[in-house]
Image (tube, rainbow, N blue to C red):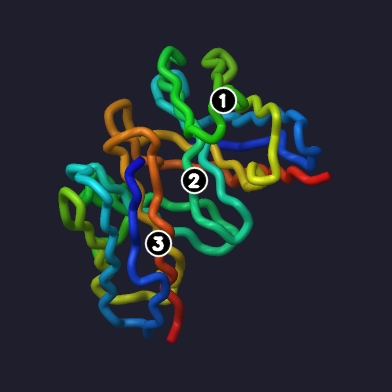
């Protein structure tokens, strides 16, 4: 199965800062990489699909890039509501797999 | 408004069975692929099973093959997960999740989940 490794595990940042989250795949997933945001007690929310396409209603401060094995989610300027856990997920092959998540918390 | 509402979770002994349901509304259920995804307490997300729009393509993660069965009833706008031979490591919040489109397996809508606890 394709293993997704997210780094770092935790980031402590302040509102207004730029955030770069990494997701590395154990083998190429093409551009079939998705990013989700999850807040405590809530279901995950789709942010980015197919590596770089923002989902409906997602603010422009969120962007995704990468292909093959290395992917990045960037938040250009952190808003208070962006403090959450972020997961990447691949749909290149079965089983669909998720990364372990990166928690972005308030410094 | 798209809504997915899971039900059927609960406390069950190891070896027991449960049937989860997911009631869909606000969209044409029969034209969307569906999934079950779970999250153990305090842990990350884990995909469990997929069923396509017509119900004729199904796949599972290895650890649940032979124990779990996904199904759907497009006349009732409902998705199901029959879980047999439950184990402690099946304990999780189970979400149903819709695919963005028939060609894009990105989960664009999720329910709020139903909790399954397997314990003696």
Q: CA distance from mark 1 to mark 3?
A: 27 Å
Q: Quadrant of the N terminus of chain A?
A: top left
x, y percentage for residue A63?
A: 23, 60
Residue A102: x %, y % from top left: 40, 66
Could you tell me which residue is drawn at 54 percent across and 35 percent down?
A: B63
Q: Is residue B42 above or below residue A33?
A: below
The residue under label 2 is B46
Local SS, label 3: strand
C-alpha distance separating marks 2 and 1: 18 Å
The quarter of the image holding the C terminus of chain A is bottom left
Residue shown at the point (33%, 53%) measured from the top left: A4
Q: Residues within 10 Å of mark 2 (few under 14, many from 20)?
A: many
**Looking at the image, which residue is at 64% across and 29% down?**
B21
Residue named by callout 1: B79
Residue B8 or A29: which is nearer the viewer? Answer: A29
The image shows residue B45, relative to residue A21, as above or below, that is above
Residue A81 occupies which quadrant of the picture?
A: bottom left
Residue denoted by label 3: A86
Q: Which chain is disc 1 placed on?
A: B
Q: How far across and down, in percent of the image, does residue B44 sit? A: 50, 55
Label of residue B58 in the image: none
- Mark 1 is surrounded, within 10 Å at the Cα level, by few (under 14), some (14 to 19) or many (20 or more) other residues, namely many
Q: Quadrant of residue A106?
A: bottom left
Do pointers 2 and 1 mark residues of a single chain? yes
Asked if residue A20 lies left or right of residue B35, the reply is: left
Left or right, B9 with reference to B38? right
Q: Is residue B78 visible?
A: no
Direction from residue B81 to residue A3 in the image, left or right: left
> Crowding near pointer 3: few (<14 within 10 Å), some, many (20+)?
many
Question: Would you place residue B117 above or below residue A85 in this image?
Answer: above
């Amino acid at each position: 199965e394709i293993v997704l490794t997210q780094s770092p595990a935790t980031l402590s940042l302040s509102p207004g800062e730029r955030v770069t989250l990494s997701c590395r795949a154990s083998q190429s997933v093409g551009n079939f990489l998705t990013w989700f945001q999850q807040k405590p007690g809530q279901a995950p929310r789709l942010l980015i699909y197919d590596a770089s396409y923002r989902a409906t209603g997602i603010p422009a401060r969120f962007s995704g890039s990468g292909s093959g094995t290395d992917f990045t989610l960037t938040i250009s300027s952190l808003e208070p509501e962006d403090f959450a856990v972020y997961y990447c997920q691949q749909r290149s092959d079965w089983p669909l797999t998720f990364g372990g998540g990166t928690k972005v918390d308030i410094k | 408004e798209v809504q997915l509402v899971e039900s059927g979770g609960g406390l069950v002994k190891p070896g027991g069975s449960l049937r989860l349901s997911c009631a869909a509304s606000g969209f044409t259920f029969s034209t969307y692929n569906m999934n079950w995804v779970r999250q153990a307490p305090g842990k990350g997300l884990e995909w469990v099973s997929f069923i396509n729009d017509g119900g004729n393509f199904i796949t599972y993660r290895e650890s649940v093959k032979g124990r779990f069965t996904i199904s759907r009833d497009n006349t009732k706008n409902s998705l199901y997960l029959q879980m047999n031979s439950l184990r402690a490591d099946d304990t999780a919040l189970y979400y149903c999740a819709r695919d963005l489109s028939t060609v894009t397996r990105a989960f664009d809508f999720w329910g709020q989940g139903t909790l399954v606890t397997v314990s003696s």
